[in-house]
Image: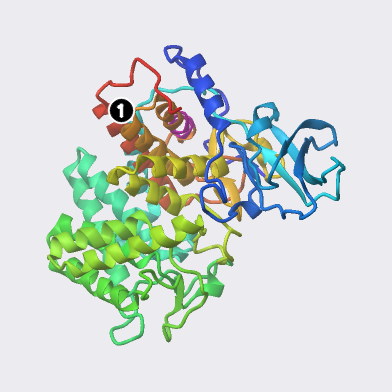
Amino acid sequence: MEQSKGIKTAFPAAAETTPWDKINEAARRYSLRPTALPQRDNIPFWNRNARQFIHPPAFEAAPSDAAREYLFELKDDEGRLIADFRADSPREPLTPVWDRVPVGNVELSISPLDADGNRLTPVFFRKFYRCACFHGPYPAVSHDYQAAAQRCFANVYNLPHVQAWLNGGTVDEKVYRKYCYPSKTLSAMIKALLYYRQITQSAEEAEKALRIAVKMADWLIDNSCAKGTPLEYLPPTYWRYAEYQLAKPHIGQIMMIYPMTVGCAYLRVYRATGERRYLDAALRLAETMKRLQLPCGSWILKLYEKDGESVVQNIVVLNETMMKFMTELAEISGDKSFIAMRDKAYSYVLENNLRLWNWDGQFEDVIPKAIYENLTKDGALFVASELFRQGDIARALEIVDWSEDQFVVWSSPNPQIPGYQTFVLPVALEQYHCYSPVDASLGRFIFAFSEAYKYTHDRLYLEKAKALADCVLRNQRPDGSIPTWFCQVDLPDWVNCMIYAAESLQYLARVIETDTGESSGDLKTRQ
């Protein structure tokens, strides 16, 4: 396969003003601490399907009645002993030897030892990848994150199939495949168009950007479920005429994370135009979501349009867009019932997803999976963001660290991941069932590390955010677009992903711009 168009391989030298020795030593020390530790943190063993670890893991090994203690042995993939240690429980983390485990494949066995010290039959065996921790410097660029974001928004405005909406263009997967997911795609495009409207120097382009956004919002309203049907006013997750193989089998289903994404788009258009039509559309949509909210506070992940029955039993993991929609709609409309709906949904994600560490991957092109089978970092990092704002810094950082542990690759990717040789590093991976480097996943961590820095003034988090942001900038194409896949793959871009990545660049730029300078001179790391 050919390398994704626009990805470059020649990088300029990194800046030399950062105290890399201190930062790297802090990163190394910190990577020796367990994170999201089952049992000890009173959470389940979430890592049964995990493939990589930056921090020392613990595993769900069965205790033996005949054991006085347990022998942990770690070997490389050729069977050579790397390290060993003894512990009272087979579920202890690998902390005592983690610093001696090199990056690479690891084979772990845990054997009981009886009262006489005799080794009994192993109670546990597991293979995994010991992943590299952060170690700068990474290739640097101009750090002009705001300008890079603006080039991306300009690119979206100038896309031929976006401009075509001015003259009869519409949802057509023949001109852009991802139109088969209209709720996700059009909502993101509306956001980018209204960003572009604010930054363009051309009054004509600003007017056109708004017109296109309006046409897209109108399409979503006109193609939503009809009044009086079980899912009235909810927009389509899958376009009814989709031919794409990953969308066609799901026509007639609505994934319930997307209606409120569209609701946010309606509110954006309402604020830009002042036209009540778009506020009313948001209110109607929200009333349906309120009616469908489960007693637990969340929603069934997928429903059939025809009768409102469940497609799967998975429960929605609340995300930042849903939270934003309910909050803003309450503020604009004055209807506080949407705050109650929001708070009920947020309580559920704390009491269930956070308590169980069940960060279910919920993507419209992946079949929903059983608990812990397809973890992702998206819902987790949303909760971290909320906890930061609420002042619960310790729990927020634990979530950020867990997410990095599972989904960031700073160097030396796991050779079991398809296409690992072509990763453009450093990168972030999307989900267990699409363990691939995606620009929006980099964006998730740019947001998360930026927030961690904002609330802790820990320089290590700032450098992590910049390293990933610089990778985005290095690989941004001359036309302003950001490739979805940070590896060699012959697949089209997801416009919504590049828009999210661009938003993360904007956020990092604001964090840097408003930084008080408290940590600019000294490195601060948690003990």
Residue marked by disc 1: 512
In the displayed structure image, the side of residue 511 where residue 426 appears, left or right: right
Q: Work out whether residue 438 or residue 81 is closer to the camera in this orientation and state it.
A: 81
> Is 86 on the left-hand or right-hand side of 290?
right
- Relative image position of residue 401 (x, y in whole percent): 49, 39
Query: Residue at 66% of width from left, 38% of height from top?
Result: 94
The image quadrant that residue 340 belongs to is bottom left
Question: Which element carries disc 1, helix, strand or loop?
Answer: helix
Which quadrant, please, contains the N terminus?
top right
Q: Nearer the viewer, residue 254 or 484?
A: 254
Magenta segment, which residues?
Answer: 467-474
Give the percent coordinates (x, y) of residue 183: 38, 64
Above/below status of 415 relative to 18 = below
Magenta stretch: dominant secondary structure: helix
| Whether residue 483 can be seen here | yes
- Number of residues whose C-alpha sits closer than 10 Å to that of mark 1, classed few (under 14), some (14–19) or many (20 or more): some
Asked whether residue 164 is in view, the answer is no
Above-or-below relation of 193 to 365: above
Is 294 situated above or below 526?
Answer: below
Q: Nearer the viewer, residue 484 or 210?
A: 484
* Residue 155 at x, y percent in the picture: 37, 43
Establish if 347 lies above or below 54.
below
How many numbered badges does the structure rendering display? Answer: 1
